């Protein structure tokens, strides 16, 4: 399958595995890359030693391109970018902050820079400032989210942008991939679907929670304090929403949510930890290998195209 994205990243299929803090490590990233997509190691909340180990491990597990994600809220983001430049990783995705100051350094190191943006204004800005591609992420997505949906972003951003646009948020099967390509996107980024994969190192309780969940099972926490995160409803999210309704002080909300993005995938506590996940859950029926996930997506996308009659 040939798109602007497959050409840019030198990959077989236009599918990126979205970075998932505390979830996507070298094992998952390498498995996705070996299956023809592009895997991404998430560095959010991790220290520099862990990042270096994971880059080394991924290099030993695949000779295909893989990426690293930088959370621009992290205090050690500059050190992480320096490390990535030294390690000559194929590409970097950058989210949760201003990516523009890093473009020059990444370009000098010949690393492809792909920021994640939540609206048209920022998409135009990162293109103008030298991004190689960009990810538009809709609020159907798992993790930290913006306010627009994936469809409204594809509708409004794709026609205005010349670099490859990757759509994210709610993609979990081949029909979604086909829809994104028809909308003019050059590929998709999927997170939740790869969370529930065999090669993902996350705790089995968290993976099972994704498999068991359906379309109405996610909740947004943090909306009122401008820091929205989508995850699967549980005791923690119920308590959070209750406190929000009572106008509880910020500190109380912060104490409840602190560390929860790690507690579910690492410790397996899926009631008081948060299984960050997107809305497209009903189609995720089992924990599958990355190869099966990608092959099914490609076959189903092809079938979806064939079914269209004009
Ligand atoms: C568990 C989880 C953790 C995430 N962590 C990050 C992160 O650290 N950095 C980032 O840029 N995006 C993060 N995301 C967003 C994903 O990279 C991706 O864009 C999103 O999952 C796409 O939506 P989907 O889950 O519906 O496929 C995370 C998503 C999930 C589900």
Image (tube, rainbow, N blue to C red):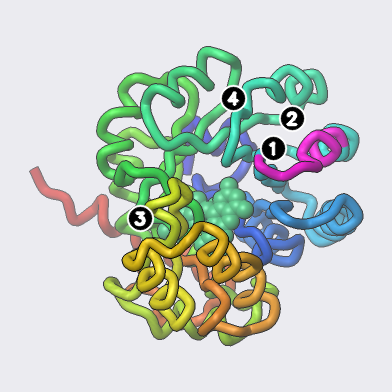
State how far apart marks 2 and 4 are (Cα).
9 Å
Q: Which mark is residue 132?
A: 4
- Going from N to C along the chain, the mark reached first, 3 or 4, is 4
Q: Is residue 193 magenta?
A: no
Magenta stretch, overall SS: helix
Residue 17 visible in image? no
- Going from N to C along the chain, the mark reached first, 1 or 2, is 1
- Going from N to C along the chain, the mark reached first, 1 or 4, is 1
Answer whether labels 1 and 4 touch (C-beta < 8 Å): yes
Q: Which mark is residue 140?
A: 3
Which residue in the rendered view is the most extreme toward the left? 310
Q: Secondary structure at mark 4?
A: loop
Crowd around label 3: few <14 · some 14–19 · many ≥20 (10 Å): many
**Which residue is the site of mark 2?**
111
State how far apart marks 3 and 2 are (Cα).
29 Å
Q: Nearer the viewer, mark 3 or mark 1?
A: 3
Crowd around label 2: few <14 · some 14–19 · many ≥20 (10 Å): many
Residue 285, quarter of the rendered image? bottom left
Which stretch did the figure color magenta?
A: 73-82
Say if disc 3 is inside 8 Å of ligand 1. yes
Q: Is residue 218 left or right of residue 182?
A: right
Answer whether labels 1 and 2 touch (C-beta < 8 Å): yes
- Residue drawn where x is 34% and y is 19% of the image: 160
């Amino acid at each position: 399958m040939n798109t602007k994205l497959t050409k840019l990243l030198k990959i077989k299929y236009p599918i990126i595995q979205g970075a998932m803090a505390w979830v996507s490590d070298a094992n998952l990233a390498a498995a996705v890359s070996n299956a023809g997509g592009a895997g991404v190691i998430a560095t959010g909340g991790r220290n520099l030693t862990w990042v270096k180990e994971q880059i080394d491990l991924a290099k030993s597990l695949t000779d295909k391109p893989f990426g690293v994600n930088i959370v621009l809220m992290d205090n050690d983001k500059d050190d992480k970018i320096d490390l990535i430049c030294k390690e000559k990783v194929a590409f970097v995705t950058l989210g949760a902050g201003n990516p523009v100051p890093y473009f020059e350094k990444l370009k000098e190191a010949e690393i492809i820079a792909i920021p994640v943006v939540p609206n048209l204004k920022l998409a135009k800005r990162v293109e103008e400032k030298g991004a190689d591609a960009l990810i538009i992420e809709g609020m159907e997505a798992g993790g930290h989210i913006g306010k627009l949906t994936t469809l409204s972003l594809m509708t409004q951003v794709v026609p205005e942008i010349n670099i490859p646009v990757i759509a994210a948020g709610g993609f979990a099967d081949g029909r979604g991939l086909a829809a994104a390509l028809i909308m003019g996107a050059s590929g998709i980024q999927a997170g939740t679907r790869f969370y529930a994969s065999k090669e993902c190192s996350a705790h089995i309780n968290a993976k099972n929670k994704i498999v068991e969940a359906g379309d109405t099972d996610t909740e947004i926490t943090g909306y009122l304090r401008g820091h929205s995160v989508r995850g699967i409803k549980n005791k923690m999210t119920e308590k959070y929403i209750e406190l929000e309704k009572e106008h509880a002080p910020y500190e109380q909300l912060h104490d409840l949510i602190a560390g929860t993005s790690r507690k579910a995938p690492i410790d397996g506590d899926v009631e008081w930890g948060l299984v960050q996940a997107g809305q497209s859950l009903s189609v995720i029926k089992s924990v599958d290998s990355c190869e099966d996930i990608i092959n099914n997506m490609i076959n189903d996308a092809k079938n979806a195209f064939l079914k269209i009659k004009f």
